[in-house]
Amino acid sequence: MASLQENLQRLQEIAANPKAQLDRYLKSGRQVVGCFPIYTPEVLADAAGLVPMGMWGAQTEFSLAKKYLVPFACPIMQSCMELALGGKYAGVKAVMISPMCDTLRCITQDFKFGVKDIVSIPFTLPQNRRITAAIQYLTEEYGHVKERLEEIYEVEIREEAIAKSIECYNQHSRAMRRFAQLANRHLDIITPTVRHGVFKSAWFMTKAEHLAYLRQIIGQLESLPDYEFTGKRVILTGITGEPASFLMILEDHNMAVVGDDLAQEMRQYRTEIPEGDNGIVRLAKQWMERIDPMAHEDELRRVELLHGLCRENAADAVIVCLMKFCDPEEYEYVAYSRELKDAGITVLSVDIDQQPNSYDQARTRIETLAEML
């Protein structure tokens, strides 16, 4: 069995180079489905024996994407379009896209028109999640996705295979939550960049493969004595907590990430797929329970969530990773940041982008935060 450091290093490598991971799958004869952020029915692809791979863009300059998207569009979507138009997703037959925001709505058409060799499978997640009709509607949407996957990849997705994949995904979610707990007892090993690599790598592997790594890492961490961390502890919230240069700033100032509400990380694993007899209905019901700014809420449950994360993990501050031009995140930030500050919790916002930059402004702001704390 590989050592703890070897396991962690392998996941860091996969997170840092998803293109190499894609090429490995294709070379081995596996077929890949692209999954745009944030929520796609990955389980259906997994049940078909396909590899669902996340599409989170990369740190890159935008050139080709400018033909399709305005400069103030979401950087992740611009980056994904840039990579697709540049042939970086070659070998992927289809992508699943849910138009959860204005830019994603455009992407469903831009991708269809601009990337001719990859089929776009759009579907809609209902925003009114408190009525029975929403479940019925989403069940039909997921049913359409299933049919398109079967047609494009010439496979059959059976009910028993869906149930098996759901069990694997739920086990993976539990393991991710357990890893997050253990990480806080070993902050000398699980630094912000290492923690992020473990989470992000899950997007570029089958959940069964990633789960195998997680189980080894969890067992190895459980065998070690707890580490007494003397630095500052922070919670991250937003879409993504990257790039590595941003996380390195935290490490340079002796800050540890002890919890998160990031779309790319723990939001994926907080809500399990519920029990039931019909796999697609179970997937639909999971969406109804998620806490996410992309989903309509009658009440702002995010405040309570962040409050709880700070309390449970003895956090000193919340750092908001505010993706540039992300309207849903910016809209909620005004409300929850005020409530958190009124409750005595320190809140700092940092702009996150997908274009290469030095993050000097973020460094200055984090230095100030460190001095304040």
Image (cartoon, rainbow, N blue to C red):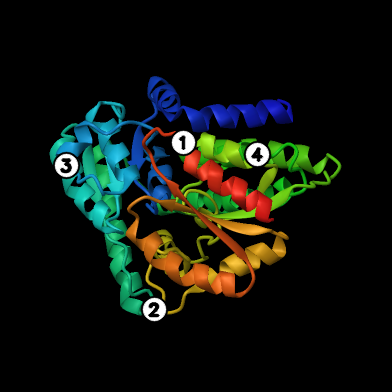
| Sequence-wise first label, 1 or 2 | 2
Q: CA distance from mark 1 to mark 3?
A: 26 Å
Q: SS of the residue at dot 3?
A: loop
| Sequence-wise first label, 3 or 2 | 3
Q: Classify the position of the C terminus by image quarter.
A: bottom right
Q: Which mark is residue 170?
A: none
Q: Amino acid at mark 2?
A: Arg
Q: Position of residue 246 (x, y in %)?
A: 53, 39
Q: Classify the position of the N terminus by image quarter.
A: top right
Q: Amino acid at mark 4?
A: Glu
Work out whether residue 212 or residue 23 is closer to the camera in this orientation and state it. Answer: 23
Q: CA distance from mark 2 to mark 4?
A: 42 Å
Q: CA distance from mark 4 to mark 1?
A: 25 Å
How packed is label 1: few (under 14 Cα within 10 Å), some, or many (20 or more)? many
| Sequence-wise first label, 4 or 1 | 1
Q: SS of the residue at dot 2?
A: loop
Q: Position of residue 198 (x, y in %)?
A: 59, 39
How packed is label 2: few (under 14 Cα within 10 Å), some, or many (20 or more)? few
Q: CA distance from mark 3 to mark 4?
A: 37 Å
Q: Is residue 177 visible?
A: no
Work out whether residue 347 or residue 292 is closer to the camera in this orientation and state it. Answer: 347
Which residue is disc 2 drawn over? 130
Work out whether residue 168 or residue 55 is closer to the camera in this orientation and state it. Answer: 55
Vertical placement of residue 312 versus 27, above or below: below
Q: Which mark is residue 251?
A: 4
| Sequence-wise first label, 3 or 4 | 3
Q: Which is in the foreground here, disc 4 or disc 1?
A: 4
Q: Position of residue 15 (x, y in %)?
A: 51, 33
Which residue is disc 1 drawn over? 204
Vertical placement of residue 87 versus 286, above or below: above
| Sequence-wise first label, 2 or 4 | 2
Which residue is disc 3 drawn over? 68
